[in-house]
């Protein structure tokens, strides 16, 4: 697993980024245009990844790097019960990533709403663990 060392200050920066990705997701979650909902899901996924990174930086002093998100799931899950909750929510988010970012199928309102809610939950958990 490839990781990179990080500081509590970087944990705060990743948490800030997570919040901004979530703001973007919330702007488009109710969009009637499927492309808007695709943007919402993509940003929700990025919010979840950033929140997970923030937790890892705060609790472990390192976070996973690279395109293999399984490493990030494993790392955050190693933190304990709260880390496993983060990993579970992030797994759910990552399950819609491919559809939103790489497939031409429309992203439905249910998927978009669920992704944004998962990202909100992840950020709330990260705030408890980082702040």
Image (cartoon, rainbow, N blue to C red):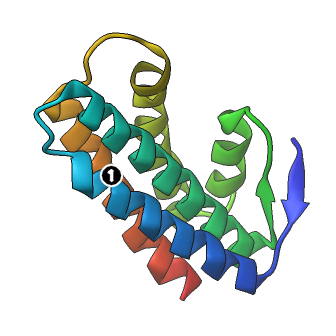
**Residue lying furthest top:** 104
Left or right side of 108 for 88? right
Q: Nearer the viewer, residue 8 or 20?
A: 20
State which quarter of the image contains the N terminus. top right
Number of disc labels: 1
* Residue 106 image position (x, y, % from top left): 25, 17
Q: Position of residue 23 (x, y in %)?
A: 34, 63
Q: Quadrant of residue 7?
A: bottom right
15 or 78: which is nearer to us? Answer: 15
Residue under numbered circle 1: 25
Vertical placement of 69 versus 34: above or below? Answer: below
| Residue for point 13% across, 44% down | 30
Q: Work out whether 18 lies above or below 74.
A: below
Q: Position of residue 25 (x, y in %)?
A: 32, 52
Identify the residue at horizontal 15%, vertical 40% (top origin).
31
Residue 125 is situated, as x and y percent measured from the top left of the image, at 43, 70
From where the camera sits, is residue 82 visible?
yes
Residue 117 visible in the snapshot = no
Q: Residues within 10 Å of mark 1 (few under 14, many from 20)?
A: many
Under circle 1, the secondary element is: helix
What residue sits 73% from the left and 32% below the top?
A: 68
Q: Image point 69% across, 46% down: which residue?
A: 72
Establish if 108 lies above or below 22: above
The C terminus, quarter of image:
bottom right
* 49 versus 93 height, above or below: below
Decide if residue 12 is on the left or right side of residue 33: right
Instruction: Depth check: give the residue in front, 59 or 35.
Output: 35
């Amino acid at each position: 697993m490839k990781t990179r060392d990080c500081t509590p200050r970087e944990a705060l920066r990743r948490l800030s980024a997570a919040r901004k990705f979530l703001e973007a997701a919330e702007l488009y979650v109710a969009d009637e245009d499927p492309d808007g909902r695709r943007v919402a899901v993509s940003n929700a996924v990025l919010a979840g990844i950033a929140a997970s990174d923030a937790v890892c930086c705060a609790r472990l002093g390192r976070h996973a790097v690279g395109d293999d998100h399984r490493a990030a799931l494993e790392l955050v899950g190693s933190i304990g019960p709260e880390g496993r909750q983060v990993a579970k929510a992030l797994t759910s988010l990552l399950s819609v990533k491919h559809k939103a970012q790489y497939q031409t199928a429309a992203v439905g309102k249910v998927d978009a709403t669920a992704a944004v809610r998962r990202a909100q939950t992840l950020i709330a958990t990260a705030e408890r663990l980082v702040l």
